């Protein structure tokens, strides 16, 4: 069953048709990769899913409900979490505080005037956040300001923050871009583990073919705002159109 | 204790002790001595210290935590004052009626102004708050609303005050000045003389001081609460908040309303000390002053705004009173030529020039201590710690928002 159903989505920026008639169906508890050259419209597509952009045409259904016209926080509360291309964390807050915020959002919803009790007295949230940090190997850094962490740690923290909300759909936008090989491999292992341990659907945009072929069960190739093909990794590897449009270029880049 | 962490409890107790003994601490010089100029322990000024402390503590909940810089908070100060004076006019001089009303009404105003202003952020938010405050100033100054309804609401440029013809339905024959429940008049002062020294213990000051301690305690609770953490998240990264399922708007609005209520309470206390309310209390310079206080002391820190308020009020009231005669008496021990020279040098920085001194200080703090006076204090403390315990491992962990 498809948890995410994108139908005929189009988005135009001035003279540029960034997305053109995009159809995409992501099966529940699968990992779906979206690949394509720079400027293909991959991030724009994600923006249309999370309420950052409203598509000009088409529909986006999540678990049978339309996400169009809803605010980003409402869409998140429906169960979609997003990891950004450049880590979006609370840089001025400590790692532990970063981790607690999504736990509060999960427990208390979009707004709660919880102004008199102290944060540390909320044992359930503190324990959950500590548990997540331990799981991500970040517990030693709990008192650190998030902005002063390494890029790899920031990425892991951001993924952990998204997971703390127990999302049904996790969207990742080039999670390994700019990462060293070792960090990339760690991220692959982490995502594999998440897939195994949770009932979660993952949609990932990625340039690194190693990452894509390690994780994805299905791949959509996007070029100039239109899906070129959608198939299993094996088929995609051998697809002549894909080799021509994308893989050749990416192999050079990698 | 009090449900706060040890450090916060310690801070609260220190502040409580300092405010309690302020009449002594602020009057360290014998009356009549050359240094008596620097004594700040008279009722009027002490009241202003704590009232502006409340104003700044509240402002800091908005600006220090969420980063939204309001340039219109003096409007709530004015609303609070008008509310209290109106209760004098309608009921009697008991301040217990007016103060809760001041908080409620300024909260309602803050809700409306915040709701509209928070549709924008950054400089546009600041301009919107400034515009609202200036409108309210203009309306109060000309009593536009009052004229519209054919009555008096703010009494225009004269300012709102109590007249004999006012209803004052609860008034008793002995009442002529603001008092608390008939127990004590706000102006009553006990002066204690110890040798050459004299210390003033004023009922109004202690009333305001107790309220300041309560609001300070409340601010600590807010800072350490999940809500306070969300406010800091608003300042840090609104995008991440939105994509974490959190609605930033009501968080910022709640902070705006809370800080507006603090301002209303401060304004109410001003009228509780002195039964007058004027439109000038709403002017943009007053809004700017609380911004300066908060930044000077350390925005986002607990004690910073109180320090900033104290500093600025001290400068305003003490430095502004130093004239050339005083300067001559200070430098009298120098040879005549040098004495005159020193007076000429110092002259621009005192008396009417106190703004210049304050401006320079503000510049120095912003450039060298972006965290305000609190950061200065922390640096000094760190220096001492390092000297005292060279072999101790350096304390790397930083607790934000002290
Ligand atoms: N907000 C925007 N306004 C105008 N043009 C945009 C905007 N977002 C993306 N674009 C353009 O749309 C195209 C697709 O961008 P994007 O979705 O970021 O590509 P990518 O596949 O590399 O993630 C690019 O040409 C980009 O310049
Ligand atoms: Mg992109």
Image (spheres, grey):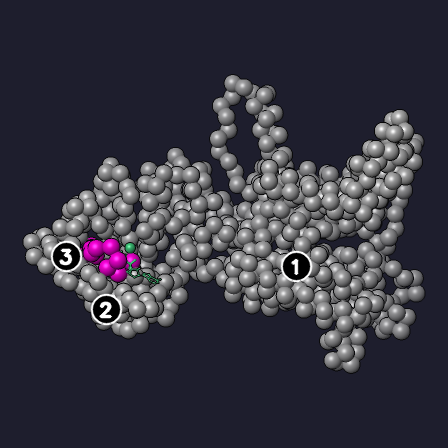
SS class, disc 1: loop
Q: Is residue B367 above or below residue A172?
A: above
State the extent of the magenta-drawn residues as a range.
A30-43
Q: Is residue B157 above or below residue A185?
A: below
Residue at the spot 58% in from the left edge and 59% down from the top edge: B126
Q: Which residue is mark 1?
A: B73
Find ligand 1 in the image and state its quadrant: bottom left
Q: Which residue is mark 3?
A: A245
Image position, residue B94 (x, y; %): 82, 61
CA gap, disc 3 to disc 2? Answer: 17 Å
Residue at the spot 58% in from the left edge and 29% down from the top edge: B382
Between marks 3 and 2 in the image, the one whose residue lies nearer the viewer: 3
Q: Is residue A42 magenta?
A: yes
SS class, disc 3: helix
Between marks 1 and 2 in the image, the one whose residue lies nearer the viewer: 2
Residue at the spot 83% in from the left edge and 33% down from the top edge: B341
Q: Which residue is mark 2?
A: A20
Name which quarter of the figure residue B131 lies in. Answer: bottom right
CB under 8 Å between discs 3 and 1:
no
Left-right relation of B90 to B252: right
Left-right relation of A215 to B381: left
From this viewpoint, is residue A248 visible?
A: yes
Question: Could you tell me which chain the residue with mark 3 belongs to?
Answer: A
SS class, disc 2: strand
Q: Is residue B394 magenta?
A: no
Q: Nearer the viewer, residue B146 or A125?
A: B146
């Amino acid at each position: 069953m498809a948890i995410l159903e994108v139908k005929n989505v189009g988005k135009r920026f001035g003279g540029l048709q960034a997305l053109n008639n995009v159809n995409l169906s992501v099966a529940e508890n699968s990992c779906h990769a979206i690949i394509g050259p720079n400027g293909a419209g991959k991030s724009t597509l994600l923006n249309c899913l999370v309420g950052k952009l409203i598509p000009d045409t088409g529909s986006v259904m999540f678990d049978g409900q339309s996400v169009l016209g809803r605010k980003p926080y409402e869409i998140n509360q429906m169960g979609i979490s997003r990891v950004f291309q450049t880590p979006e964390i609370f840089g001025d807050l400590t790692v532990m505080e970063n981790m607690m915020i999504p736990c509060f959002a999960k427990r208390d919803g979009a707004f709660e005037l919880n102004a008199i009790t102290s944060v540390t007295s909320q044992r359930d949230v503190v324990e959950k956040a500590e548990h997540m940090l331990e799981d991500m190997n970040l517990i030693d850094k709990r008192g650190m300001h998030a902005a002063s962490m390494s890029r790899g740690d920031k990425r892991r923290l951001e993924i952990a923050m998204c997971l703390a909300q127990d999302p049904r759909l996790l969207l990742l936008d080039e999670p390994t871009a700019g990462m060293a090989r070792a960090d990339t491999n760690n991220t692959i292992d982490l995502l594999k583990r998440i897939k195994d341990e949770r009932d979660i659907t993952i949609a990932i945009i990625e340039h690194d073919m190693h990452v894509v072929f390690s994780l994805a069960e299905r791949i959509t190739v996007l070029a100039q705002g239109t899906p070129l093909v959608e198939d299993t990794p094996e088929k995609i590897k051998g697809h002549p159109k894909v080799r021509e449009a994308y893989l050749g270029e990416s192999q050079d880049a990698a | 204790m009090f449900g706060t962490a040890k450090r916060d409890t310690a801070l609260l107790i220190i502040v409580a002790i300092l405010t309690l003994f302020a009449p002594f601490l602020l009057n360290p010089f014998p009356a009549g001595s050359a240094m008596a100029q620097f004594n700040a322990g008279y009722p009027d000024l002490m009241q202003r210290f704590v009232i502006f402390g409340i104003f700044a503590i509240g402002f800091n909940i908005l600006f220090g935590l969420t980063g939204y810089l309001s340039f219109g908070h003096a409007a709530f100060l004015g609303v609070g004052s008008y509310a209290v004076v109106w209760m004098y006019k309608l009921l009697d001089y008991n301040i217990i009626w007016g103060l809760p009303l001041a908080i409620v009404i300024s909260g309602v105003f803050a809700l409306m102004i915040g709701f509209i202003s928070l549709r924008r952020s950054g400089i546009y938010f600041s301009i919107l708050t400034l515009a609202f405050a200036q409108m309210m100033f203009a309306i109060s100054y000309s009593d536009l609303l009052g004229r519209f309804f054919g009555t008096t609401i703010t009494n225009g440029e004269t300012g709102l005050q109590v007249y004999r013809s006012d209803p004052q339905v609860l008034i008793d024959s002995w009442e002529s000045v603001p008092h608390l429940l008939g127990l004590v008049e706000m102006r009553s002062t006990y002066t204690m003389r110890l040798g050459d020294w004299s210390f003033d213990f004023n009922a109004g000051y202690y009333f305001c001081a107790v309220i300041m301690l309560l609001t300070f305690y409340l601010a600590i609770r807010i800072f350490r609460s999940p809500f306070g953490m969300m406010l800091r998240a608003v300042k840090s990264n609104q995008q991440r908040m939105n994509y974490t399922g959190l609605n930033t708007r009501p968080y910022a609005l709640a902070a705006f309303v809370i800080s507006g209520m603090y301002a209303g309470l401060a304004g109410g206390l001003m009228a509780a000390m002195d039964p007058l309310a004027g439109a000038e209390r709403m002017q943009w310079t007053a809004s700017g002053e609380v911004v300066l206080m908060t930044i000077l002391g350390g925005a986002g820190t607990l004690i910073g705004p109180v320090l900033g308020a104290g500093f600025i009020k001290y400068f305003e009231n003490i430095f502004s009173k130093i004239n050339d005669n005083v300067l001559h008496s200070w430098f009298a021990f120098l040879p005549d030529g040098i004495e005159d020279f020193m007076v000429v040098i110092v002259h621009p920085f005192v008396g009417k020039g106190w703004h210049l001194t304050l401006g320079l200080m503000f510049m120095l703090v912003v450039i060298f201590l972006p965290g305000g006076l609190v950061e200065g204090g922390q640096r000094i403390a760190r220096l001492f710690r390092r000297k005292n315990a060279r072999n101790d491992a350096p304390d790397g962990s930083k607790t934000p928002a002290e």
